[in-house]
Amino acid sequence: MEVRAVSKYVRISPRKVHILIGAVKGKPVEDGLNILKYMPQKAAYIIEKIIRSAVANADQYPDIDVDSLVIRNIIADQGPTLKRFRARARGRGTRILKRTAHITVILAEDSI
């Protein structure tokens, strides 16, 4: 059985989240949280929070053993982009794209 948690409109670029996804995908939840705890990136804290939310969702089902959960997949999709302008020389303006992400964490029971 799979359990998921979704966080939408997170103010971080999906590219920065993709860097950390490979480090925790396929690992048990406890190991994944320990890895993310000592990573300095902002995305590590965000992913850690979403994994904890997915574990709390799994805890609501009596037939799921929370201790045997594995991080099956983490998906970071592009959300809407906030478009801003910065003043430049000679009265011009350049565009700043503030990207957002929709992050989905899918946990499943280990089939050992």
Image (spheres, rainbow, N blue to C red):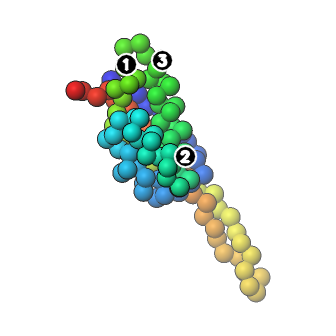
Q: Is residue 94 above or below residue 58?
A: below
User: Residue tagged by mark 3?
Assistant: 60
> Which residue is most to the right?
91
Residue 44 got which mark? none
Q: Secondary structure at mark 1?
A: loop
Q: Which residue is mark 1?
A: 64
* Residue 20 image point, x, y percent: 43, 52
In this view, 75 is above or below 92: above
In the foreground, 84 or 62: 62
Give the residue at mark 2.
45
Number of marks in the rendered image: 3
Instruction: Say which element carries label 2.
Output: helix
Marks 3 and 1 in Cβ contact (< 8 Å): no
**Side (left or right) of 83 relative to 67:** right
Label 2 and label 3: CA atoms lie apart by: 23 Å
Q: Which badge, 2 or 3, comes first in the chain's sequence?
A: 2
As measured in the structure, the alpha-carbon distance from the residue carrying label 3 to the one carrying label 1 is 9 Å
Residue 45 image offset from top left, x and y in percent: 55, 46
Q: Residue at horizontal 46%, vertical 28%?
A: 55
Element type at mark 3 = loop
Query: Would you say residue 35 is visible in this rendering?
Result: yes
Instruction: Identify whether 95 is placed above or below 17.
Output: below
| Residue at the bottom extreme, as displayed | 90
Identify which amino acid the numbered label 1 is placed on. Ile
Q: Amino acid at mark 3?
A: Gln
Q: Residue at x 74, y 76 (%)?
A: 87
Residue 75 seen in render? no
Give the amino acid at mark 2: Tyr
- Look at the picture and state if 108 lies above or below 83: above
